[in-house]
Image (cartoon, rainbow, N blue to C red):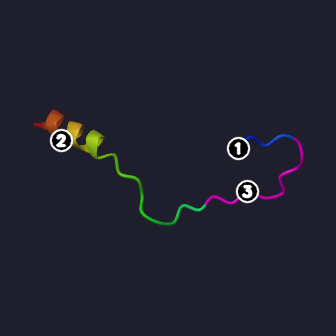
Amino acid sequence: MIFTGGTLHRVVVDVSGEPYVDLERQAAAMLARE
């Protein structure tokens, strides 16, 4: 979606819910520590 023209009066970002977890990055970090 592309917004062209007009005026934004308010922007709301909803960060509720489950946080994103990068399991691949966590696994790589664990292996690097061992």
- Location of mark 3 (residue): 11
Whether the residues at callouts 2 and 1 have beta carbons within 8 Å, the answer is no
Q: Is 12 one of the magenta-colored residues?
A: yes
**Which span of residues is magenta-colored?**
5-13
Which residue is nearer to you in this view: 5 or 14? 5
The tag on residue 1 is: 1
**Tag 2: Cα neighbours inside 10 Å, few (<14), some, or many (≥20)?**
few
| Badge 2 or badge 3: first in the primary sequence | 3
Task: List the residue tagged with mark 2.
Answer: 30
Residue located at (40% from left, 53% from top):
20
Q: Secondary structure at mark 1?
A: loop
In-image side of 11 versus 32 (left or right): right
Task: Report how far apart the C-alphas of labels 3 and 1 lie in the structure.
Answer: 15 Å
**Front-lying residue, 3 or 21:** 3
- Asked whether 27 falls inside the magenta stretch, the response is no
Q: Earlier in the sequence, mark 3 or mark 1?
A: 1
Local secondary structure at mark 3: loop
Report the mark closest to the observer, 2 or 3.
3
At a point 10% along the width and 37% down the height, the residue shown is 34
Marks 2 and 3, how far apart at CA: 38 Å
- Above-or-below relation of 5 to 9: above
Q: Measured from the top left, where is residue 19 in percent x and y?
A: 42, 58
Magenta span: predominant SS is loop
Q: Tell me which numbered mark, 2 or 1, is placed earlier along the sequence.
A: 1
Residue 14 position, x and y percent, is 59, 62
Taking the view exactly as shown, the residue that stands out farthest to the bottom is 16
- Inspect the image, locate mark 3, and give the three-letter code of the amino acid beneath it: Val
The quadrant in which the N terminus is found is top right
Quarter of the image for residue 10 reads bottom right
Q: For this view, does 11 lie left or right of residue 19?
A: right
Q: Secondary structure at mark 2?
A: helix
